[in-house]
Image (cartoon, helix red, strand yellow):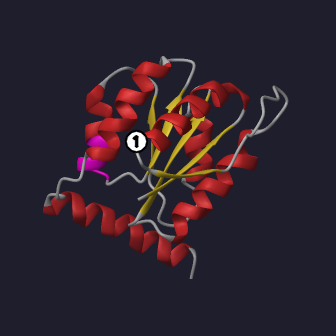
Amino acid sequence: MIIHLATDHAGFAHKQAVAGWLLEEGYEVIDHGAHEFDESDDFPDFIALAAAAVSKNPQSECAVIFGGSGQGEAMVANRFPFVRATVLYADNPEIVTLSREHNHANVLSIGARFLSIDATKKHVWNWLQLHTPLEERHQRRIQKIDDITKQLHA
């Protein structure tokens, strides 16, 4: 599985730590930046690159994106077809579980100002390991989202 990473300055330390850790765990990681800390950078420049990559292969690739709250980053990511980004801004494992089991999220947006790096790693690990089959009602809802996306981008 390819994991795309992206951040601005607010999530830079988290991205760097997660990138190295995922590589050690044997994952293929593509880092879309930021590649150096610059407190005047803008998250859409980097998040769009990761989201575009997931949009091309939404069933087999995913992304973990980082920002101060994770909210704006998810908003950018969700502009891309077939991207389903969810925000994690609290140390609550149910957020991660439900994002996969109910919404088949393929992008996890981390609110770095609200989570430690260790908590982030724990939740990213759990998010990556969740591969439970979707219940029919959840699959139906995701299909409706995909149908709307197809109509908007036709």
Does the magenta segment cover residue 100? yes
The secondary structure type at the circle numbered 1 is loop
| Residue 136, quarter of the rendered image | bottom left
Residue 96 location, x and y as percent? 32, 36
* 148 falls in the magenta region: no
Q: Which residues are magenta?
A: 98-103
| Residue 67: % across, % down | 62, 31
Out of 152 and 85, give the one closest to the viewer.
85
Characterize the local packing of mark 1: few (<14), some (14-19) or many (20 or more) Cα atoms within 10 angstroms: few
Task: Report the amino acid beneath label 1.
Answer: Glu
Quarter that holds the N terminus? bottom left
Name the residue: 36% across, 31% down.
Answer: 123
List the single residue furthest toward the right: 40
**Main SS, magenta residues:** helix
In this orientation, which residue lies closer to the viewer: 72 or 152? 72
Residue at the (70%, 44%) spot, across then down: 33
The residue sitting at 40% across, 65% down in the picture is 60
Nearest to the observer: residue 24 or residue 100: 24
- Rendering coords of residue 141 (x, y %): 28, 61
Quadrant that contains the C terminus: bottom right
From the image, tell me which residue sits under label 1.
Answer: 25
Q: Is the residue 41 above or below the residue 149 in the image? A: above
**46, above or below 70, in the image:** below
